[in-house]
Amino acid sequence: MIKGLCITPPLLGRISIGRLVEKNGRRLPEKDDQFTITSQVQHHEGWVPHPLDGIFRETSGGGKLRAIPVTVMFSEPELNLRAAYSLFDRQTGRPLCMGNGETCKRFTASGIAELPCPAPEGCEFGQGGCKPYGRLNVQIDAADELGSFIFRTTGYNSIRTLSARLHYYQAVSGNLLACLPLELRLRGKSTVQSHRTPIYYVDLTVREGMTLEQAIREARETQDRRWEIGYDQDALDAAGREGFAKGSFEESEEEMPEVLEEFFPSLNNELKTIETPNGSSGNATKPTLTEKLKLQASRKTLSN
């Protein structure tokens, strides 16, 4: 196995509560009041919708998608939802530092170091660029029991609510979190900071029409059925824990454009306008992010 490569659950698609819109020739993120389920394929108009998006919209009456039936893969809440204070390099989109308020992993001149983490409000290194960043993996496609969809967020409300729900459901069900029939639900609230306009966050509940007692009863039946066929949940959790521990940071180089698009839209649009080497155009192949960054660096050198 490649050392330093974080092994994450296989992805089938993405779940978001926002979208990218074209404004003055630039692609900018815009908050939405519904879920969107997309595939991992992107074209000039944005992410291609996943077939499940249309299916769930039909079952919800054809309106806005504000609830998605899900299950989680792992019994440990921290394996399903990884959240950390995160600082990304605005030049490359790569993670520079990630911490939990006590310790952090940070890129330094001598390599990755483990250092104290004072949280964003007390961190001189972050200089206001550090923010909470959460990734939740859920399963919504019964055809692929080990595949998942990812929801990424920097919202305190979503991270705090999802973390609480996962820990509570694990406790109240007797560690049957991975067997519970759950539902991602979009909720709205207004605050002074939002100037009394609605802001939306993601919650995790038992399926609509079920009580918690019914959900736990179904989870026990699922657990018994899995034990009967030899499904080893403990081994799956151990494999997940080991996979996440193999890498210092979860995002791969392939995912960096997504990070740029999601958290640094102005920089991402700036990089997209960089011309291909030698001024080529027309049918020239689209430069990779690495090529764009190298070209940007060379231009800075020439201008100094």
Image (cartoon, grey):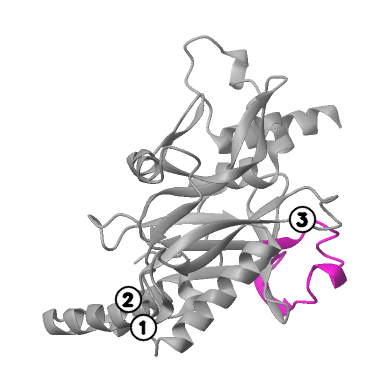
For mark 3, give the secondary structure.
loop
In the image, is residue 151 above or below residue 178? above
Distance between the Cα atoms at labels 1 and 2? Answer: 5 Å
Residue drawn at (36%, 40%) of the image: 58
Residue drawn at (35%, 45%) of the image: 59
Q: Are marks 1 and 2 in contact (CB under 8 Å)?
A: yes
Give the residue at mark 3.
Answer: 190
Quadrant location of the N terminus?
bottom left
> Is residue 251 visible to the viewer in this orientation of the structure?
no
Q: Residues within 10 Å of mark 3 (few under 14, many from 20)?
A: few
Give the residue at mark 2.
Answer: 179
Residue 176 is marked as: 1
* Image-based side of 250 in relation to 92, left or right: left
**Front in this rendered view, residue 32 or 198:** 198
Magenta residues span: 105-132
For mark 1, give the secondary structure.
loop
The residue type indicated by label 3 comes to Ser
The residue type indicated by label 2 comes to Cys
